[in-house]
Image: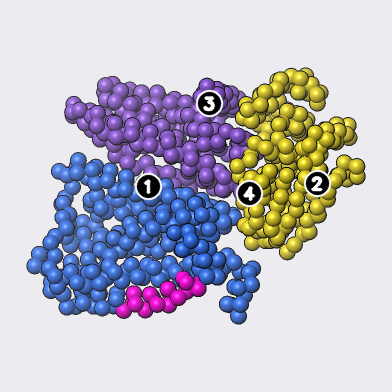
Chain colours: A yellow, B blue, C purple
Amino acid sequence: MLSAKGLVCIRNERILFDGLTFELESGQLMYLTGANGAGKSSLMRCLAGLHQPQEGQIRLFGQDIKDSGDKILFIGHKTAINEWLSARLNLRYWLSLSQLAGDEETLLNKVGLLPLADIPTRYLSAGQKRRVALLRMWVSQAKLWLLDEPFTSIDVSGIAVLQQLFKRHTDSGGSIIVTSHQILPDDLVDRRLELEYRF
Amino acid sequence: MFKWLHPYAKPERAYALANRLYLWLWPLALIGLFTGSLWGLMFAPSDYQQSDSFRIMYIHVPAAIWSMGIYMSMGIAGICALVWQMRSFELSVLAMAPIGAVFTAIALFTGSFWGKPMWGTWWVWDARLTSELILLFLYLGVFALFYSFDDKRAGAKAACILAIIGMINVPIIHYSVEWWNSLHQGASITKFDKPSIAKEMLWPLLINIFSCLLLFIALTCYRFATELLASESHRKWVTKIIQ
Amino acid sequence: MANLVNYYIQFIKRDLQLAVRQKHEFVLPLLFFVLILILFPVTVGPESGLLARLAPAVGWINLILSLLIALPRMFSEDYENGWLEQVFLAAVSPSFFILTRILSFWLLYCLPLVICSVLLVPFMSLPFDIWWVLAQTLFLGSLLVAALGSVASALLVASRKGSGVLALLLLPMLIPALIFGSAVIEAAQQSLPYLSPMLLLAALAVFCLTIAPVAAAQAIKINLG
């Protein structure tokens, strides 16, 4: 469903990757690894259509990536959580931005944040903030998930929950690309892609 | 248009074209400017009202004409850059900006020097002078925007957007300033009408206007080629040229 | 259509909520506006005739300068926390989001300043009926500042260079608005009809409100890349 052909990405005079080509079928999880600065995040941003690669083509279901924003769920380093708004409002506004329906309370309950739903998120811990952001995975209708370091500051039990969620998504025909410095269990990973650091 | 342009999307072709244009136009522009200015300054008859001070016109008028023209061509290049996503157009916007700013500054300074003997003052809030001054700031905005980006490519694209907005704005500013000036006619010192001009004075002026255009194109090509080399410095074709 | 109206209301509500939670940011331009109003009589002297003559110009320039304080922050928070990325990935075109931001910016920053300009009446002995005309031009003019300012702010969202460059980008663009605005006031002061420059100002505002969201969306896209 996702195909990338001959991607070239140059950032600040440094070539991150040159002629990168891969394909991802539905139901697959791709585990993207590489050293710091190897270009993992840049590749994710290219795939999300936020950054335009200098050369090459990315197609999702045969369509140009620029026209298929709503088929993608992207959770990057920046979690789009506003520190001044409560978890409930953060979630509500993300839902209306994505034109999705969902009940904030049941969602927040899933990650155990219901008691903290109405205080500004700047009073939450880093892990709790990230949990609020990751709640989008429960409601999103997107086929392709692009998750850039989703496990950052998430505790062990949280990671287990996320991995179950990955499994559910791939089983229902969705695809996931995930970057992480965490080792993922082999039965979860269908494909691996390692980016080399280049000078 | 795109089919015709397509071969030049390749940077090495664009470089070759710019380089060739520069090599041809640069001497032509210099010869033209030399003859036009010499003719204008030495041999054209002096004006019966303004005596010799009108001769600054031979520099002032071409600079003023092309200062607006360069902004327009920058805007058009900016549109092309955003529509076709071609690096060459972005670079050409950046190549044109300083040249246009210098033309504008020349027009302002010579206008001011011309104004001193004619109006008795260095500056009046005449419509043309005012819109020329605003134009200078529009040019400076394009630089300032480009240099406030760390990433050159992003800076160039942002500069393109600004050039397009500026292009839409230049006529609005120009006509509103003219309208403003006509409201305050009583207060302003003189109405600067274009005087009808004798043929012997006109020829060198036309030569200079045309050579300034050539000069602009030549300088743009030169700057464009250099920028292209710098931005593609990691490519093979560049190393070949440099060696 | 109803969907879109809902969208506008939602996100204007979001901006208002954010403003309420960050009151300190939101009152700064207002305080600046009032301070400048004090500086003028102090520098040119308290003679009421001169002050009344200067008052409309002070109102306009003061409005623009005060908004320059608020403009750099128009998108910066949403850029830094990644919200804008989500906006660009959503199904609804980002231009709509930017239009809501322009409107909420206008409600939060411009409208209070327009109302605050009534202080020109006591402080600079501006006749009340002239202030009323001035307020109308400021109403339209501030829409224009918000629209064009959104583009300038969007262009500079990632650069953190502050309001210096923003002023350089924005001020030349505002000159037509200033010209029409002051023409309205001048006509009003001489009891002449001022409808035509007012309409020109309104036309300019509508024009800018139409193209600014598209241009600002492009600008933000570049900054996200």
Residues packed near mark 2 inside 10 Å, few (<14), some (14 to 19) or many (20 plus): many
Amino acid tagged 3: Leu
Question: Is residue C168 visible to us here?
Answer: no
Residue C9: image location, x then y, percent: 54, 23
Residue in the image at 29% along x and 25% along y: C133
State the SS at label 1: helix
Report which residue position mark 1 lands on. B168
Above/below status of A15 relative to C88: below
Report which residue position mark 4 lands on. A51
State the SS at label 2: strand
Comes first in the chain, label 2 or label 4: 2
State the SS at label 4: loop
State the SS at label 3: helix
Q: Are marks 4 and 3 on the same chain?
A: no
Residue in the image at 35% along x and 53% along y: B135
Mark identifier at residue C4: 3
Q: Are marks 2 and 3 on the same chain?
A: no
Residue C48: image location, x then y, percent: 26, 28
Above/below status of C104 relative to B237: above
Residue in the image at 61% along x and 77% along y: B240
Q: Chain of mark 4?
A: A
Q: Is residue B138 in the magenta section? A: no
Report which residue position mark 2 lands on. A30
Amino acid tagged 1: Ile
The CA distance from mark 2 to mark 4 is: 20 Å
Q: Which residues are magenta?
A: B15-31
Q: Chain of mark 2?
A: A
Q: Are marks 1 and 4 on the same chain?
A: no
Amino acid tagged 4: His
